Image (cartoon, helix red, strand yellow):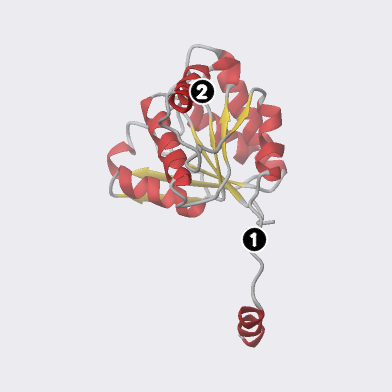
Amino acid sequence: MREIRSICVYCGSGQGTDPVFSVAARVLGQMMAKAGIRLVYGGGRIGLMGEVARSVLETGGRVTGIIPEFLKAREVMLADAQELHVVADMHARKKLMFDKADAFIALPGGVGTLEELVEQLTWAQLGRHDKPILIANINGFWRPLLSLLAHMRESGFVRPGLEVKYLVADRIEDALDMILAAAPVEAPQDEEARDIIRRM
């Protein structure tokens, strides 16, 4: 099984109206830090982004923040992260977040969070990666999206062979175990490949 060493967490730069969203972000951060899993996220210190990142740091974990130059002030860049990348634009941010993550979790958030989540779902559907994707359906936040995905399947737009693969956790306490259990299995190497590696 491929080891999950880092998880990219997509979430809002706002807190949302339900305090349980912030609680879930903090609990997730604590769980990741205790498990030795690095947080990869959008680099801000406000909203749910700030909650999860500060929780990881306060629990002794490690954080990689990735933020576009134009959002440094608006999202209040978290300078305490051990690894911080300031990139040119949103495309560079999303690419680097993908490259540095072994899995993805979507907490509640707005249009940006939705766009990031759907992009990963699309890439997985098209076979561009097999990293686990988990939707943290805190207090039913993502229920409308889950209904829409079901509607797409029922309407024939998500066809057999092009399934959208994702996990759903209704309790944040279950999220990490579900992600770890879904880690992809490494393909066995053939004998020639093993010989090459042994000679390196």
Residue at 46% x, 36% y is 159
**How dense is the environment of label 1, judged by Cα within 10 Å: few (below 14), some, or many (20 and up)?**
few
43 and 103: which is toward the camera: 103
Q: Is residue 18 left or right of residue 197?
A: left
Say which of 185 and 134 sits in front.
185
Q: Nearer the viewer, residue 84 or 160?
A: 160
Helix, strand or loop at disc 2? helix
Residue in the picture at 56% in, 20% down: 21
Residue 33 % position (x, y): 67, 42
Residue at point 64%, 45% (across, down): 61
What's under tag 2, amino acid-wise? Leu
Q: Position of residue 25 (x, y in %)?
A: 58, 28
Q: Quadrant of the N terminus?
A: bottom right
Q: Which residue is mark 1?
A: 186
Circle 1: element type: loop
- The numbered mark, 1 or 2, whose residue comes first in the sequence reads 2
Give the left or right position of residue 72, taking residue 32 as reference.
Answer: left
Which disc, if any, is residue 14? Answer: none
Q: Which residue is mark 2?
A: 146
